[in-house]
Image: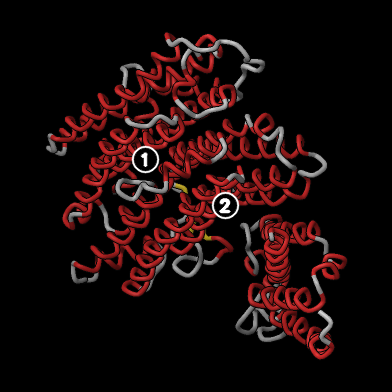
């Protein structure tokens, strides 16, 4: 029974995804509540799974009783259980705001939106648990399809444009990944990652073959994750989506692609041969470019949602940098940042969504005087922004500190420089907004409804992981050690 | 479209097309094809019906909300069959290992749950084809 848990988490979310459109017409409120309960249950089950996996070792489960390499194999490692827990918890928290957000939506659209959110969560969990490449690809596509859907959920012109752009570029990314999987299958004869990896290690392949496979995977997955210079769809898509979708796309979805990359790379090739092939260096280079370019683009934005989206381009660079540096410290930093950035970005999007709703515009000028209007949401916005900048005691600082150390450990002395530079850039675009919120002159009236559901749990978690990072980091180093070995 | 030849020939062919679709769905465990291909043939037959006899006559038989509901039903059917293995003490989606009689290979009623599960896939694919066509037509 316990071995079924990874599959059950995915199937539970899938079933509820397809139940939602059946009932939303008559029982909208109940559908929203049930969707929330299911997501919280999935979050609880994955946390339980994480606890068990850390204690008792990873679970390998053959779906339908067909053993690998013929059947579909699902593995719950500390790494995948952690990522699924983070994803489901953040989705569950963001979904608390669903009833308020969908107040004026027609019931057809509300139903499909819930379906897409649940489908997205299920697919992310499936992608993280999958141990064979084909299943990974299927869930990869389901994640992409549901992301395109939720971007277009607002049904205005800019959302349709952004979704179409995302669709086209996403299709290119998918074809790169499919090509990489195809080459892997032709060369090794296996789709199961453990078997393919054993084959690659044992066979005397021409060094170009693993290099080509890894490069195709890197381009495809980095495009989906929005790494510079393949980020061009991201600011449009993440700013045109409804608030909750922006929070999830920026906070969770792009990270799952980074985790998929780490799983495939370490699963197929292992850290040492990645370094030897120069793939790690390529990842690090793309990550650094992403960190710097994302922040520079964010600096000149006047639209708050685009600013936050460009900031995501920079922050996904941290995750890739951690994976690229390798070693337990680097990977642990990447995993920690997946959680920390998810919490920060979701809070920032939810809080600014409220300001956009009140001011009726996405310009950052609208933040002037918002502190008096919405004291609590803006306090949490400030907290998350300071954490982005990397103020000590907050979660963003821990990531930066660990990347700093991982860079020194790997004797790459430019890494600390980039981390500090990025902090300065983050400060340069976040602090003016924070200043505007508390000291700017603006209309301070018209707030009938000051609550933003879900913001307080996010803030509590953000402070908790920032103040007491050690238990979590110990766990993550264990997960990282498992990934690397 | 009052084209008599087209209507007569379509009404003659439709039962055979649908029969073939159902055949492909039911023989999924024996021959190439299966739920997806058979569902596709069934869905295409409904699209052909709309093209020849008009959207309204198909909407009267299968309303849009019914085809959407059937889409959900197909997926839920698949998941529900997956739980049979779990309820019998084995794992999710398990068939023979869960002690289900798989019959003689090569016969129509063999393969245990595979036969039942492809019906869900067929319903899902056919209704998705129809829903997609409805959505495309309604948007113009």
Q: Quadrant of residue A468?
A: top left
Q: Nearer the viewer, residue B122 or A417?
A: A417
Q: Earlier in the sequence, mark 2 or mark 1?
A: 2
Residue at image coords 28%, 34%: A296
Q: Is disc 1 on the same chain as disc 2?
A: yes
- Residue A353: image location, x then y, percent: 54, 28
Q: Residues within 10 Å of mark 1 (few under 14, many from 20)?
A: many
Instruction: Please tell me whether residue A32 is drawn above or below residue A157 in the rendered image.
Output: above
Residue A93 lies in what quarter of the image?
top right
- Report the chain holding disc 2: A
Q: How is the image coloured?
A: secondary structure
User: Label 2 vs label 1: CA separation?
Assistant: 20 Å
Q: Position of residue A147 (x, y in %)?
A: 53, 49
Q: What residue would you read off at disc 1?
A: A479
Identify the subunit bearing mark 1: A
Residue corresponding to mark 2? A7
* Quarter where residue B60 is shown: bottom right
């Amino acid at each position: 029974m316990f071995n079924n848990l990874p599959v059950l988490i995915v199937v539970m979310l899938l079933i509820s995804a397809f139940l939602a459109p059946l009932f939303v017409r008559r029982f909208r409120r109940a559908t929203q509540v049930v969707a929330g309960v299911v997501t919280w249950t999935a979050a609880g089950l994955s946390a339980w799974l994480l606890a068990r996996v850390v204690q008792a070792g990873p679970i390998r489960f053959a779906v339908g009783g067909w053993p690998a390499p013929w059947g579909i194999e699902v593995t719950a490692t500390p790494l995948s259980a952690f990522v699924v827990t983070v994803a489901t918890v953040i989705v569950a928290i963001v979904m608390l705001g669903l009833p308020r957000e969908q107040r004026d939506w027609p019931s057809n659209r509300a139903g499909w939106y819930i379906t897409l959110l649940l489908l997205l969560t299920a697919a992310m969990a499936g992608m993280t648990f999958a141990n064979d490449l084909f299943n990974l690809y299927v869930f990869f596509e389901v994640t992409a399809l549901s992301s395109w859907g939720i971007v277009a959920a607002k049904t205005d012109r800019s959302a349709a444009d952004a979704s179409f752009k995302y669709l086209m570029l996403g299709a290119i990314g998918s074809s790169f990944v499919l090509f990489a999987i195809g080459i892997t299958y032709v060369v090794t004869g296996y789709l199961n990652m453990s078997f393919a990896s054993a084959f690659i290690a044992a066979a005397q392949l021409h060094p170009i073959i693993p290099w080509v496979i890894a490069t195709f995977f890197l381009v495809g997955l980095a495009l989906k994750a929005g790494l510079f210079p393949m980020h061009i769809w991201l600011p449009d898509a993440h700013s045109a989506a409804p608030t909750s979708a922006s929070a999830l796309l920026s906070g969770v979805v792009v990270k799952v692609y980074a985790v998929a990359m780490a799983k495939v790379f370490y699963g197929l090739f292992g850290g040492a041969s990645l370094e030897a092939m120069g793939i790690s260096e390529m990842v690090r280079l793309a990550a650094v470019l992403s960190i710097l370019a994302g922040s520079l683009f964010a600096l000149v934005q006047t639209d708050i949602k685009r600013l936050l989206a460009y900031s995501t381009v920079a922050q996904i660079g941290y995750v890739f940098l951690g994976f690229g540096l390798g070693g337990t410290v680097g990977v642990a930093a990447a995993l920690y940042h997946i959680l920390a950035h998810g919490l920060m970005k979701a809070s920032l999007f939810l809080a600014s969504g409220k300001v956009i709703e009140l001011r009726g515009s996405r310009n950052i000028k609208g933040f002037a005087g918002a502190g008096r209007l919405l004291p609590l949401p803006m306090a949490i916005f400030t907290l998350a922004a300071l954490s982005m900048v990397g103020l000590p005691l907050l979660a963003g600082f821990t990531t930066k500190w660990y990347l700093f150390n991982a860079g020194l450990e790997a004797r790459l002395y430019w890494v600390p420089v980039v981390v500090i530079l990025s902090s300065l850039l983050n400060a340069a675009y976040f602090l003016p907004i924070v200043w505007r919120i508390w000291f700017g002159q603006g209309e301070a009236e018209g707030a009938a409804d000051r609550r933003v559901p879900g913001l307080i749990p996010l803030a509590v978690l953000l402070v908790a992981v920032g103040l007491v990072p050690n238990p979590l980091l110990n766990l993550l180093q264990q997960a990282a050690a498992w990934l690397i070995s | 479209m009052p084209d008599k030849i087209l209507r007569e020939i379509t009404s003659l062919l439709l039962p055979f097309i649908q029969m073939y679709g159902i055949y492909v769905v039911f023989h999924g465990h024996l021959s190439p094809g299966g739920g997806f291909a058979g569902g596709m043939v069934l869905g295409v037959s409904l699209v052909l019906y709309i093209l020849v006899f008009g959207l309204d006559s198909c909407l009267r038989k299968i309303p849009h909300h019914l085809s959407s509901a059937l889409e959900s039903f197909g997926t839920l059917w698949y998941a529900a069959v997956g739980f049979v293995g779990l309820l019998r003490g084995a794992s999710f989606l398990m068939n023979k290992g869960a002690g289900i009689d798989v019959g003689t290979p090569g016969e129509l009623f063999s393969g245990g749950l595979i036969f039942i599960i492809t019906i869900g896939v067929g319903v899902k694919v056919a209704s998705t084809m129809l829903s997609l066509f409805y959505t495309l037509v309604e948007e113009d």
